Amino acid sequence: MKRKVMVFFLLTGIVFGASSCTKKSKKDSNAELLASILSQGTAIDSACQRFISSEANCVAAPDSSAAVCSGLISKVKGAILPQELNTDAVAILYFDCFTKINLTYNITKGCNKNSFNSNSDYRKVQRTGSSQAEITFRENVNKCGSLENEVPPADSGLSETNTILSSDPFQ
């Protein structure tokens, strides 16, 4: 129950944080928020939407979660090893871990809606940039995915799954 409450507040914070950075009319913002709430499907869809929202905070023209989540969900689940453990529940833990990393990166980088042109540009800089924000980001990605023999953060719940990612699914 605590996790559901935490997820609700995290999602609410992301939505309100993202909407406060735009110059949309109140009517447009309310319509967008309502569409986002109504489009909330399964828990895995919600986790993917939170991930996309965490990137959108720094992107001028962000991807639509409705357009990209089915592909991202497949990529994340496809990267989970062993394959027999690539369930929605485990994929949600990975999405949540990557979302936290993005939010930390955004703060460290001091980015805003105009920092990157697209989600693709955002991810490229995260993975190839040389600033301390990007170096820390890559270290944390390795931890989340248990890449390069790293151990996931204790609060992520990933250690208990006995899974790893075969690669970074968001590249």
Image: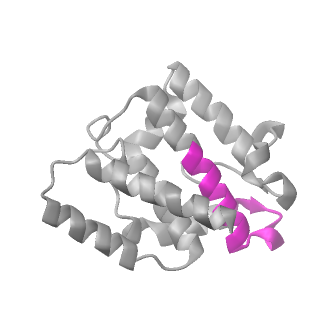
For residue 61, side relative to residue 145 (left or right): left
Q: Main secondary structure of the magenta part?
A: helix
x and y percent of residue 115 in the render?
31, 34
State which quarter of the image contains the N terminus: bottom right
For residue 137, side relative to residue 56 (left or right): right
Q: Quadrant of residue 63?
A: bottom left
| Above or below, comparing residue 161 to residue 152 in the picture | below
Q: How is the image coloured?
A: one colour
Q: Quadrant of residue 40?
A: bottom left
x and y percent of residue 165 in the render?
73, 53
| Above or below, comparing residue 71 to residue 143 in the picture | below
x and y percent of residue 67 in the render?
38, 69
Span highlighted in magenta in the image: 79-100
Residue 146 seen anywhere in this rendered image of the structure? no
Residue at position x 48%, y 59% in the image? 11
x and y percent of residue 152 in the render?
77, 44
Compare residues 164 and 161 and report the one nearer the observer: 161
Q: Is residue 7 magenta?
A: no
Residue at position x 81%, y 70% in the image? 85
